[in-house]
Image (spheres, grey):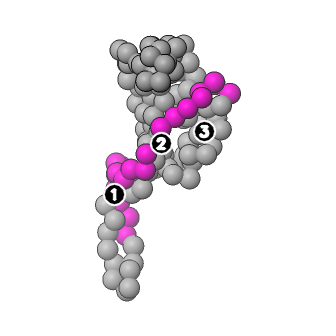
Amino acid sequence: MKLIMAVIKPFKLEEVRQALIPVGIEGMTVTEVKGFGRQKGQTEIYRGAEYEVNFLPKVKVEIAVSDDVADLAVEAITKAAQTGKIGDGKVFVYSVDKAVRIRTGETDGEAL
């Protein structure tokens, strides 16, 4: 099993969700986060004063999948989230040792 974590631009979330449906992804966890990378921050003006925003709003999407679907899911996320501009985000893939569905007690593949 794999845990796919993607940090993307917020306006790309719905496109990513739609791209994962044909892959067979039935659920995901979404968290609003802030961060920066090469995109750095940006300068904004508030009441005539200029200030720098160091952390930009992003969305973190987490998906647990079976090993055979992981590459397809990463490809779908990458294509759907890409704008071609700096700050598109990153995708990380982790190995998952165990998963348990709390309601039924199902484990590993059945729990997904």
Label 1, residues with CA under 10 Å away: few <14, some 14-19, many ≥20: some
Q: Which mark is residue 30?
A: 2
Q: Which comes before the other along the chain, label 3 or label 2?
A: 3
Q: Residue at 33% x, 57% y: name it.
A: 55
Which residue of the protein is positioned furthest toward the bottom in this rendering? 48
Secondary structure under the numbered disc 3 in the rendered image: helix
Q: Which mark is residue 55?
A: 1
User: Disc 3 residue type?
Assistant: Arg
Location of residue 42 by image quarter: bottom left
Q: Residue at 44% x, 16% y: name it.
A: 105
33 part of magenta stretch? yes
Front-most of residues 88 and 73: 73
Residue 44 % position (x, y): 39, 73
User: Disc 2 residue type?
Assistant: Val
For the residues labelled 3 and 2, the Cα–Cα distance comes to: 10 Å
Tell me whether circle 3 and circle 2 mark residues in contact (CB < 8 Å): no
Secondary structure under the numbered disc 1 in the rendered image: loop
Label 2, residues with CA under 10 Å away: few <14, some 14-19, many ≥20: some
Q: Which residue is mark 3?
A: 17
Q: Which comes before the other along the chain, label 2 or label 1?
A: 2
Residue 70 % position (x, y): 51, 20
Front-most of residues 26 and 69: 26
Q: Which comes before the other along the chain, label 3 or label 1?
A: 3
Q: Residue at 42% x, 56% y: name it.
A: 57
Foreground mark, 2 or 1, reads 2
Tell me if residue 15 comes above or below residue 54 in the rendering.
above
